[in-house]
Amino acid sequence: MRARIDALNALGIPTEFHAYEGLGHGFGLGTGTIAEGWINDAISFWERQMK
């Protein structure tokens, strides 16, 4: 994943990547986990890209 993020950044494509300790892919909304609130961060990122 790091190589993919680096490649996108090199092309000037805005990216964000968050790895949550102890969670794999597919943690849903993250309710009750370290990832709780991730959806709000994602929405903020998407909104910034639409401006």
Image (cartoon, helix red, strand yellow):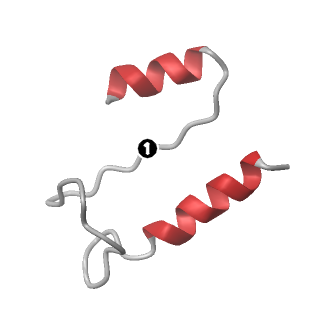
Foreground of the two, 3 or 28: 28
> Is 10 located above or below residue 4 in the figure?
above
Residue at 31% x, 50% y: name it.
19
| Left or right for 38, reference 31 | right
Is the residue marked by circle 1 packed among few (<14), some (14-19), or many (20+) residues within 10 Å? few
| Left or right for 12, reference 17 | right
Amino acid at circle 1:
Phe
> Is 21 located above or below residue 36 in the figure?
above
Instruction: Name the residue furthest left.
Output: 22
> Is 32 located above or below residue 9 in the figure?
below
* Residue 35, image x, y percentages: 33, 69
The quadrant in which residue 3 appears is top left
* Residue 5, image x, y percentages: 45, 28
The quadrant in which residue 2 appears is top left
Instruction: Name the residue furthest right.
Output: 51
> Is 51 located above or below residue 12 in the figure?
below
* Residue 21, image x, y percentages: 20, 57
| Left or right for 32, reference 23 | right
Residue at 31% x, 74% y: name it.
30
Q: Quadrant of the N terminus?
A: top left
- The residue that label 1 is drawn on is 17
| Left or right for 50, reference 45 | right
Instruction: Name the residue furthest bottom.
Output: 32
The quadrant in which residue 43 appears is bottom right
* Residue 20, image x, y percentages: 27, 57
Counting labels gives: 1
